[in-house]
Image (tube, rainbow, N blue to C red):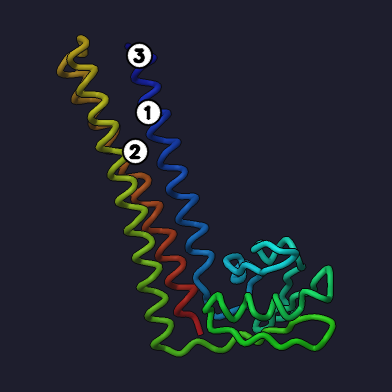
Amino acid sequence: MEEEIEFIFDGLNEANDKAIKHLISELEKIRAGRATPSMLDSVTVEAYGALVPISQVANVNTLDARTLTIQPWDKSTLDEISRGVINANLGLNPQNNGEMIIINVPILTEERRIDLAKKAKAEGEVAKVSIRNHRKDALSDIKKLKDDGLSEDRQKDLEEEVQNVTNTYTKKIDELVAKKEVDIMKV
């Protein structure tokens, strides 16, 4: 019985950790006014007959807080990299100088900052829904254990423990989203 309980909590924590990792990766994709190489993680480039992530054909670096540079390993892919950045609809305008691609990241308007903050909140809500679904699954598994002889008091204790785990992860999500919102709204 205790092994099954431990299995339920291990699964709950593992699933919640994945939800947090996913949230972090989604929040990193949301631009916060300064240039970061992760802004281009979603860019795919047609190179050598296949669509590949930009990281497989070039080095992406920051020159300063507002400028990204893309140094391709093969200069023949410069035009395809530019096309990939444009097609990714990131609102960025790549400039090809024949050696590398330079992207000046525009300053975010107040309206755009508010939209990005809303997007961060929405990503947080998606993560919270995931956490609540994991809680529901764990509670369902605990109810099944009651049929196998788990006492009612022990069931209530375990349900309370599941809720505490859920509250902890929900609080972490709120902290991550709040931190991102502050980052976005910072001029």
As drawn, is 25 to the left or to the right of 35? Answer: left
Pointer 1 residue: 9
Amino acid carrying label 1: it is Phe
Amino acid carrying label 2: it is Val
Q: Kindly identify the residue that appears in the image at 80 percent across and 88 percent down.
A: 97
Pointer 2 residue: 165
Pointer 3 residue: 2
Secondary structure at badge 3 equals helix
Secondary structure at badge 1 equals helix
Amino acid carrying label 3: it is Glu
Badge 1 crowding class, 10 Å Cα cut-off, few under 14, some 14 to 19, many 20 or more, is some
The answer to which of marks 3 and 1 sits earlier in the sequence is 3
Where is residue 178 drawn, in percent x and y? Answer: 40, 65
Where is residue 76 drawn, in percent x and y? Answer: 82, 76
Spatial CA distance of label 3 from label 2 is: 18 Å
Whether residues under marks 2 and 1 lie with C-beta atoms below 8 angstroms apart, the answer is yes
Against 105, is 164 above or below?
above
Where is residue 32 drawn, in percent x and y? Answer: 52, 76
Against 96, is 84 above or below?
above
**Quarter of image, res 84:** bottom right
Secondary structure at badge 2 equals helix
Spatial CA distance of label 3 from label 1 is: 11 Å
Closer to us: mark 2 or mark 1?
Answer: 1
As drawn, is 15 to the left or to the right of 89? Answer: left
Seen from this angle, which residue lies furthest front? 49
Location of the N terminus (image quadrant): top left
The answer to which of marks 2 and 1 sits earlier in the sequence is 1
Residue 182 vs residue 100, the one in the foreground: 100
Against 28, is 100 above or below?
below
As drawn, is 148 to the left or to the right of 3? Answer: left
